[in-house]
Image (cartoon, rainbow, N blue to C red):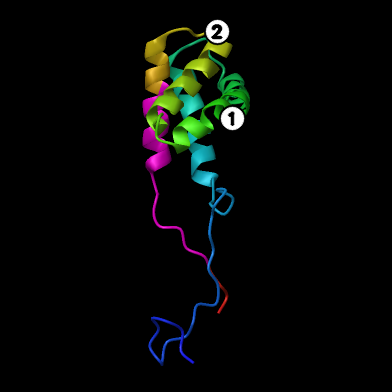
Amino acid sequence: MPYAGWADTAEPPKAVCFDLHGTLLDDTNRLVAIRRTCSEIATAWPGLDPAGLLEANSQVWQTYWPSVEEQWTLGVLDGAAVSLEAWRRALRACGCDDDSVAHRASDIHRRLASVGRGPVTFDTGS
């Protein structure tokens, strides 16, 4: 008996993947973008250490994201606002309270993170 909606000659799918928890996506580009953003910001603003900013960013996301995840999911907060606040907190942890630096970091990160984005595909090996 053919599957509903499938032609008699069509093969049923071998697998269907649902990424309901964001665990199947490759985060490599995002991580590289964060590292490069930290380097660019530290180069432009003397006194900032790229490794320290990277660590601060990681710490901020561990504490900040759980407090805003639901609001982001529901559309109350957008990604740009969340990113800006995360950079603001990371920079503040490094002793930089200049809001223009947080805006610059957020802009740089958004630009770098968008490079190479495309559809996610999986090799099923068949």
Front-most of residues 46 and 79: 79
**Residues packed near mark 2 inside 10 Å, few (<14), some (14 to 19) or many (20 plus):** few
Q: Quadrant of the C terminus?
A: bottom right
Residue 98 percent location from the top left of the image: 42, 8
Residue 29 percent location from the top left of the image: 49, 44
**Segment colored magenta:** 105-122
The residue positioned 53% from the left and 59% from the top of the image is 18
Mark 2, secondary structure of its residue: loop
Q: Does residue 105 appear to the left or right of 34 in the view shown?
A: left
Q: In the picture shown, does residue 98 fall above or below 36?
A: above
Residue 73 percent location from the top left of the image: 46, 38
Asked which quadrant contains residue 65, the reply is top right
Asked which quadrant contains residue 45, the reply is top left
**Does the magenta run of residues contain 12?**
no
Q: Are marks 2 and 1 in contact (CB under 8 Å)?
A: no
Q: Does residue 58 appear to the left or right of 107 in the view shown?
A: right
Residue hosting label 1: 66
Real-space Cα separation, disc 2 to disc 1, in angstroms? 24 Å
The residue positioned 41% from the left and 37% from the top of the image is 112
Residue hosting label 2: 95
Front-most of residues 81 and 125: 81
Mark 1, secondary structure of its residue: helix
Q: Does residue 118 appear to the left or right of 30 in the view shown?
A: left
**Residues packed near mark 1 inside 10 Å, few (<14), some (14 to 19) or many (20 plus):** few
Front-most of residues 83 and 15: 15
Three-letter code, disc 1: Pro
Q: In the picture shown, does residue 125 fall above or below 6?
A: above
The residue positioned 51% from the left and 33% from the top of the image is 70
**Sequence order check: which comes first, mark 2 or mark 1?**
1
Three-letter code, disc 2: Gly
Mark drawn on residue 29: none
- The label nearer to you, 2 versus 1, is 1
